[in-house]
Image (spheres, rainbow, N blue to C red):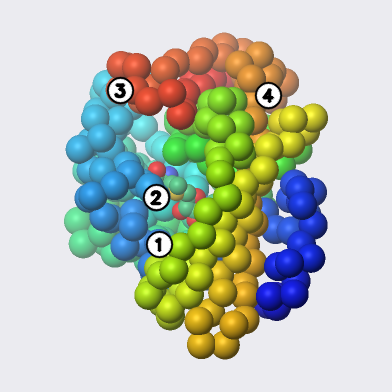
Amino acid sequence: MATLHDIITRRTPPVPWEEGDNIPWHDPAFSERMLAEHLNQDHDLASRRFGLVDAHVDWIHRVLLHERPARILDLACGPGLYLNRLGQIGHRGVGIDFSPASIAHARQEAATEDLPLHYVKGDIRSVDFGVGFDLVMLLYGQLNVFRRAEASAIVTRSRAALAPGGIFVAEPQTFDHVRNSGLADTSWSGQSSGLFSEQPHLLLTESFWDEEGRTGTQRFYVVDAASGVATQHSLSNEAYGDEELVSLFSDAGFRDVELLSSLTGHAASDEMLIVVART
Ligand SMILES: C[S@@+](CC[C@H](N)C(=O)[O-])C[C@H]1O[C@@H](n2cnc3c(N)ncnc32)[C@H](O)[C@@H]1O
């Protein structure tokens, strides 16, 4: 909890990671509100709209997996939009995410269709991945939300979770996207209800770019209209240049690391790129 005085005397710029590392994905009430955004077909904020997810799944199935049944590990799987579709076309696998509402949704959909998938509610920085996977996925910008050492550990543990011949496909944010997000203007809005709170509140947002550390940080204050009490959330993203990305994977023991422009094979937005790393 923060007071208005805390907001006025806040440290600017913040030290990346020091005030928090992510928005509260794992908070039950927040995760319920976020699940609605994942499933919302008017925007691509939390997950892509289903048409694009279908196109990505088709590319993964045809180009990466050569249409052969595979065992897949989906890290930070959200509500299972990718893994459940892959399950429907003959793949098996495990999805891990620490959002309770997303994991419940993914499990329920998989159970309804009796798909050979298992969902684990856990933090991918610490939960055991298991072994013997043909494909590990870490999609939609999530590689960047971890400190560099944590990202490196996740890549190394993913390498160990892969069977011989296995593939890691990651979709990091581009360097420029992280940098531009960090250079975004300060803004505020009054909301009768929103992602951070169901109650009327002011949402204050500011962004920072740390050139030396190549890290972007967003800071949010959610000021409750009734009490004037503020809740603060901060998230940081590491920016990787192409060479550093390739090193992250080759240092973890991948022998063949390729950078692509999108998960459909066509150039899409310049916000994300694809790393395909082979054992
Ligand atoms: C932008 S969403 C993407 C979800 C999914 N990959 C997709 O594209 O539909 C990011 C997801 O990462 C999850 N996440 C972030 N940090 C995590 C962590 N440390 N452990 C597990 N899940 C995490 C969040 O809960 C959220 O579901």
Q: Which mark is residue 46?
A: 2
Q: Which residue is mark 4?
A: 248
Asked whether mark 3 lies closer than 8 Å to ligand 1, one says no
Decide: few, some or many residues near mark 1? Use Cα within 10 Å; few <14, some 14-19, many ≥20. many
Q: Which residue is mark 1?
A: 34
Residue 192: give x, y in percent of width and height: 37, 75
Residue at the image position 26 percent from the left and 59 percent from the top: 109
Asked whether mark 2 lies closer than 8 Å to ligand 1, one says yes
Q: Is residue 255 visible?
A: yes
Residue 238: give x, y in percent of width and height: 66, 36
Q: CA distance from mark 3 to mark 2?
A: 19 Å
Q: CA distance from mark 4 to mark 2?
A: 25 Å
Sequence-wise, the earlier of marks 4 and 2 is 2
| SS state under label 3 | loop
Amino acid identity at mark 4: Leu
Residue at the image position 51 percent from the left and 65 percent from the top: 203
Q: CA distance from mark 4 to mark 1?
A: 30 Å
Residue 199: give x, y in percent of width and height: 43, 80
